[in-house]
Amino acid sequence: MIRKNVSMEDEYLQKLQPFLEKNNGNLSAAIRDVIEFADAALQGHESVEDAMEYFTRNSTKYPEIRNNLIESGECILVSQLSFRWLIENTDGILVDDELVSEIFNPYQIKNVPDLLEYLNIRSQNMGWEVEAYSSIWEDNTEVIVIENGDPSLRAYLAEAISIFIGRHLNLDVPFVHRKSNSIRIFLKEHRSYTDVPAGIRKNFGTLDYTFKEIRSKPDFWNSLVERYRLQRYQRVNLNKDVFETFLSGGIPDVTNFIEASAGKPIREIPLYELLAICKRLITVTQLANDLERTVERGKISIKIRHQFSEETAIEKLTEFFSKLFKMAGCIFEIRSISNLIIIEFADSS
């Protein structure tokens, strides 16, 4: 056993007080406990300074900043459960620009490295435990990676980052890869001076326009949703002009809908793409229940299921789809059996 004389100021004796109390005033035992505690605290750190910085940053700086923000009224504390509910139930609605600017200062951030540095510093100061960095994918695509932290907060920050780069850095987000502990945001150049780029809206704002419409006419949409719900979606939703044509005994032309969906003239739409649009048309209008596609010996056929029982109604529906595919220049045979309309195409190209 080695004996040493140790001298220290009262300030340090006060810091030893919890250990002295634990050991009934035995200074030697208290110092042994402190040494054990220090040894455990140094695990995973390269130096004493590194450990001190870690504990100072995470145990002192963050609570101080947090308390100041709460006392000033700028922030409030909410439970993790409440925060997750809020994020999950606003999924698909784009974060407002003013909230994005509150997180990321557009006057200080001029490029992606600035953005990531800004986020990492703020994450450290706020105790988010989120880390962000960029990497280059196989095809030279730049990717922002956001890791760790609460999953809901990570999702919120990923959306805010995407909106920021779309608004201020002339970038779009064509693809987002979400994993259990990370989110990868793929970037591409894009210039938009009016609206959020299409890729960002597709990956983060699929319900944004929908909710804006609901908020603008809540009585109408509440009534419509209630009717659909009570009638188990057994309703038909048609454009006014299409409905008028049906009322007058004619067969409506939906070429405009098809071309708008495909972004090209109807005769330039490949059959597989045309069938996908038709399936979406059926889903939106509820003219039929489903469209099932099969391929046999290189030939495509489809079965359109419906719930109409009146012979005249079935004939009109059959003529409707027949007219549509004729307008597209398809060669086919069509027949109706009970609640099925069967169309067999001569050419699968």
Image (tube, rainbow, N blue to C red):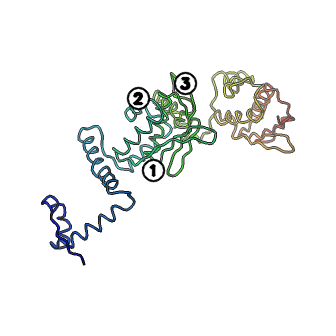
Dot 1 or dot 2, earlier in sequence? 2
Dot 3 or dot 1, earlier in sequence? 1
Q: Nearer the viewer, residue 77 or 247?
A: 77
Image coords of residue 67 (percent x, y): 25, 45
- Residue 31's image quarter? bottom left
Q: In this view, does 263 lie to the left or right of 160?
A: right
Image coords of residue 239 (percent x, y): 63, 25
Residue on which disc 2 sits: 106
**Badge 2: residue crowd in 10 Å (few <14, some 14–19, many ≥20):** some
Q: In this view, does 348 lie to the left or right of 174?
A: right
- Residue 73's image quarter? top left
Image coords of residue 50 (percent x, y): 34, 53
**Badge 3: residue crowd in 10 Å (few <14, some 14–19, many ≥20):** some
**Badge 1: residue crowd in 10 Å (few <14, some 14–19, many ≥20):** some
Q: What residue type is labelled 2?
A: Pro
Q: Which residue is drawn at 43% across and 49% down?
A: 150
For mark 3, give the secondary structure. Answer: loop
Q: As displayed, is residue 329 above or below residue 21?
A: above
Look at the numbered discs 3 and 1 and tell me whether their residues touch, using CB distance below 8 Å: no
Image coords of residue 249 (percent x, y): 74, 23
Quadrant in which the N terminus is drawn: bottom left
Q: In this view, does 112 lie to the left or right of 256?
A: left
Compute the Cα span from label 3 to label 1.
Answer: 31 Å
Compute the Cα span from label 1 to label 2.
Answer: 25 Å
Quadrant in which the C terminus is drawn: top right
Q: Which residue is drawn at 81% across and 43% down?
A: 295
Q: Which of 159 and 301 is in front in this view?
A: 159
Residue on which disc 3 sits: 191
For mark 1, give the secondary structure. Answer: loop
- Residue 34's image quarter? bottom left
Q: What residue type is labelled 3?
A: Arg
Residue on which disc 1 sits: 148
